[in-house]
Amino acid sequence: MATTAKTPSVPRPVAPRPSGLRRLSGAGRLVGWLDDRIGFRALAPLVRKKRVPVHRHSIWYYLGGMALFLLVLQICTGVLLLFYYRPSAEGAFESVQFLMAEVKFGWLIRSIHSWGANLMVLTLFVHLFSTLLLKAYRRPRELTWISGVVLFGLALGLGFTGYLLPWNELAFFATRVGTEIPAVFPVVGDFLKETMRGGEDVTGATLTRFYALHISVLPGAAILVVALHVLLVQRHGMSVPPSVKRQETAPRTVPFFPNFLLRDLVGWLLALAILASAAAFFPAHLGEKADPFAPAPSGIKPEWYFMFMFQTLKMLPARIMGLHGELIGVLGFTIAGVVLVLLPFLDRPLSDGRHREVWRYLAIFALIYVVVLTVIGYSVDPTR
Ligand code: HEM
């Protein structure tokens, strides 16, 4: 083996430090190096300028940040689940079973993902109704509102598609019921149903479709729309509700950084603690593997956030004015969705600058409707 002769080490000349220059830590130098190339320090004045109004409704301002935190948590836990999940009718159930029983903390990650989905939808319901009742959708926040409604739809889509992935009995039959609903539309109904299912019935093809939607299309779209939504919030700042604006003195404001963000952080830690406790005390269920040839178990129920629609369709008579009752129900919800999107353009100021009260009453009615129908859905006999 060849040996190399040792060369005496020559001390390298040290560049003289210009006087007055502060000694930078390794991290500081790295940040400086990155900033020279990216220029992110230009954002600092924007962050320093942002202020949040303080008044009796300020508590609702925390919900958007909470939704953002939960979305990030869902993406992180979802990616971890992907390391073990197998998207096929033959392997999905077994892979989730393995994850729950054999993988270290697999049960915890799955349970946090499952509880996190519920908490995120709940947070979005409250965020939607609070911005609705505080009139935050009015000019110039029309696009903030519309992007929010799209995000709400995406979150419901993520919930619906994710529910099927463990391929257990309950999810299988609930998806069969859910994907049957668009079939009530004349002409395009069967096409819609078969497109959702990837065939006549819920099969492995449906699972592949839902998987693609759940792990790439819907989260990808959500990330893009959230970026737009948050950008618009930065552009317009936080709205002050009309009832606060009418007061003689303008509300005081606090800096977003660090005051508001630190309080946001407290909320996020609280949410994490709630999720970890829920996951530890009530881990996510798995139940039996789906058997497409078995009879549907009695009392199939959708996720709680679809319950008000499910219960409405169940309570409608079979025929209304010669039309299929379910069709009337589905059309009703479609129209309600369109009204929700277009609300900023429907609730225009009158010539004297005031607004019609009807939108406030409709919003309160919608809120009561969702709560009451959900409660009825859970209190009726599941075998009926
Ligand atoms: C993943 C979904 C969502 C995320 C991450 C998100 C995030 C945020 C954030 C960070 C804010 C600023 C703080 C706040 O007001 O709470 C905000 C404001 C707002 N959001 Fe959302 N949001 C989401 C969904 C929605 C939905 C479903 C709606 C309603 C349809 C909505 C409507 C609004 C409006 C109108 C504002 C402005 C509030 C104001 O200026 O007072 N957002 N959102």
Image (cartoon, helix red, strand yellow):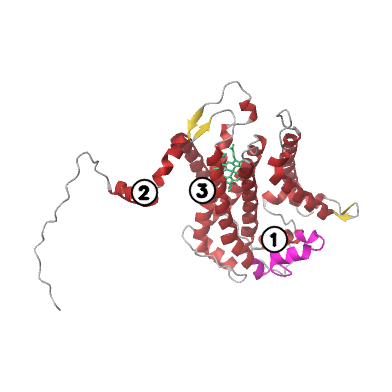
Q: Where is residue 160 in the image (x, y as percent from the top left)?
A: 65, 57
Q: Give the range drawn in magenta.
A: 182-207
- Please tell me which residue is depicted at 50% across the width and 55% down the height of the picture: 76
Mark positioned earlier in the residue sequence (1 or 2): 2
The residue that mark 3 highlights is: 276
Does the magenta-highlighted stretch encompass residue 351? no
Measured in 3D between alpha carbons, the distance from the residue under mark 1 to the one under mark 2, in whole angstroms, is: 49 Å
Q: Residues within 10 Å of mark 1 (few under 14, many from 20)?
A: many
Kindly report the distance in space between the C-alpha atoms of the residues bearing marks 1 and 3. Answer: 28 Å
- What x and y, as percent, mark residue 216? 56, 61
Residue occupied by mark 2: 35
Residue at 63% over, 24% down: 246
Residue closest to the far left: 8
Observer-nearest residue: 357 or 108?
357
Residue 175: which disc?
A: 1
Q: With 215 as the anchor, is 34 left or right in this view?
A: left
